[in-house]
Amino acid sequence: MCDPLTGLLNRRGLTKALEEICNASAPASLLLIDVDRFKSINDTLGHDAGDRALIELTGDMRAVVRTGDSVGRYGGDEFLIILPDLDTAAALTVAQRLLDQIDQSNTERSAPFEISIGVASKRDTPTSPDELLKAADEALYEAKKAGSGAARAFTAV
């Protein structure tokens, strides 16, 4: 249930948390996060620098989430933050706080990085995890098109 590098939930742990919020009759949101140009960090500075960036991102995410939010490494350089009881507007606020946190932390990093964030939300009716993840992925794609350090939301599912 735990990613050995970051100490966050792994994909199995995230899947369980995602199923819980998707089956609940309450609003919820998720942030799908991707490190921009992560391959160039590994190729230019080495895999140790890439691992350090992922660990530093872990600290930034932990600094902005609430108790009860689920944070995990979805795979490679992709992360999920599951936000129970938050609608799209509130989730975008969390996304912006994370972007600001990274900007602030980058001033002290030897290898600064940026992220893109896709936000997807569900209303107070159950939905499928696949549907919510697909919406977050589409929003992430739009954020990447907007440029590094962006967050975009997909219409609630």
Image: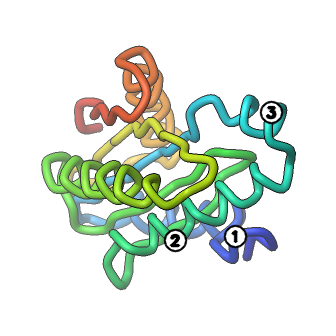
Please tell me whether residue 115 is drawn above or below residue 55 in the rendered image. above
Left or right: residue 91 compared with residue 137:
left
Three-letter code for the amino acid on which mark 2 is drawn: Gly
**10 Å neighbourhood of mark 1: few (<14), some, or many (≥20)?**
some
Q: Position of residue 58 (x, y in %)?
A: 56, 66
Per the rendering, the mark at residue 44 is 3
Q: Position of residue 69 (x, y in %)?
A: 39, 73
Per the rendering, the mark at residue 128 is none
Three-letter code for the amino acid on which mark 1 is drawn: Thr
**10 Å neighbourhood of mark 3: few (<14), some, or many (≥20)?**
few
Q: Mark 2–mark 1 contact, CB under 8 Å?
A: no
Q: Secondary structure at mark 2?
A: helix
> Foreground mark, 3 or 2?
3
Q: Position of residue 100 (x, y in %)?
A: 29, 53
Left or right: residue 49 compared with residue 131:
right
> Foreground mark, 2 or 1?
2
Q: Residue at left 45%, top 65%? A: 61
Q: Residue at left 48%, top 40%? A: 115
> Foreground mark, 3 or 1?
3
Please tell me whether residue 34 is drawn above or below residue 155 in the rendered image. below
Please tell me whether residue 23 is drawn above or below residue 7 in the rendered image. above
* Distance from the alpha carbon under mark 2 to that under mark 1: 9 Å
